[in-house]
Amino acid sequence: MKAGVFDSGVGGLSVVKSLIEHNVFDEIVYYGDTARVPYGVKDKNTIIRYSLEALEFFKNFDIDILITACNTVSAYAIEELRETAPFNVVGVIEPGVIATCKKLRDKNADILVLGTKATVKSGKYSRLLQEKGYTNINSLAPSLFVPIVEEGIFEGELLQTTMQYYFANIEKDPDAIILGCTHFPMIFDALQKYFPKSTLIHSGEAIVEYLESKFNFSHSTEKTKLMLFSSENPDGLKTTAKQWLQTEI
């Protein structure tokens, strides 16, 4: 099977990494809209328009399924994409919620959702978790994490200072932290060190479990073929891919 993976920038590579590690697909076509990243500060209509434009790009490939690895797109444009696409479209928010429910049996557990401003404003994570019976949900938009990751910075003093800025008022480690932006798993180790008692949940592993449960397909027996495309600075995307995926592109 061939999958398309769409993100506003390089963050969706965190989903690609999990897909490759689990040999989910024979081929993956990745498109990062790096010329217009981040989507998380834009209004709903713009997010939908950008998403539908990306969909036209994927129509040039014979893909079986499109994964919107961008949480912001999953929050605002998933229905429009499903109505228009000639193939299945899967977002990352629902899988993230399902993964959270599997890991947290206590409905009163302290859950922190980290996402872009747009994703947090949508309230989609909170609504879905509340429908599952969870009562203690907080959300935070550490927006500077996105450009930091886009610069290929996954650790170090700048990231530490930025985390201290955003998390200064958090008095104790939440029981679970949902990484509600696919850029954030790229700083997973730094976040786990900052919150050593928290369970971190990210879209990559969640989407693999979701795909396995929802679709009947056999895993690839060969190395996944990966094609990378971006709307700007393709060399930058390839550099991050080599660093993050630890493979030649």
Image (tube, rainbow, N blue to C red):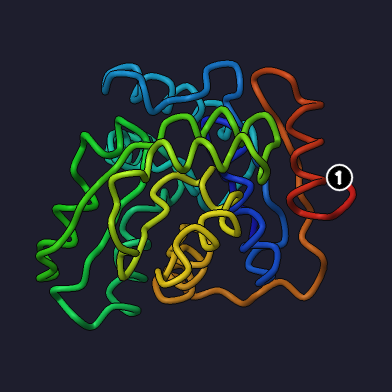
Whole-percent x and y of residue 78?
Answer: 32, 41
Residue 141, compared with residue 188, is above or below; it is above
- Quadrant of the snapshot with the C terminus: top right
> Dot 1 lies on which element?
loop
Residue at horizontal 58%, vertical 54%? 190
Query: Which is more toward the observer, 146 or 209?
Result: 146
Given residues 243 and 98, the one toward you in this image is: 243
Left or right of 131, for residue 19: right
Side of 93 where 223 appears, left or right: right
194 versus 133 height, above or below: above
Residue 127's spot in the image, x, y percent? 14, 53
Question: Residue 27 in the image: x percent, y percent?
Answer: 71, 54
The spot of residue 23 in percent (x, y) is 69, 70
| Residue that badge 1 annotates | 249
Three-letter amino acid code of the residue under disc 1: Ile
- Quadrant of res 154: top right
Q: In the image, what residue occupies the spot 76% across and 25% down? A: 234
In the current view of this chain or complex, which residue is farthest to the bottom?
A: 105
Along the viewing direction, whichever of 141 and 6 lies nearer the viewer:
141
Image label count: 1
Q: Residue at x 42, y 31 (%)?
A: 143
- Residue drawn 82% across and 65% down? 223
Badge 1 density bin: few <14, some 14–19, many ≥20, Cα 10 Å: few
Residue 20, placed above or below residue 54: below
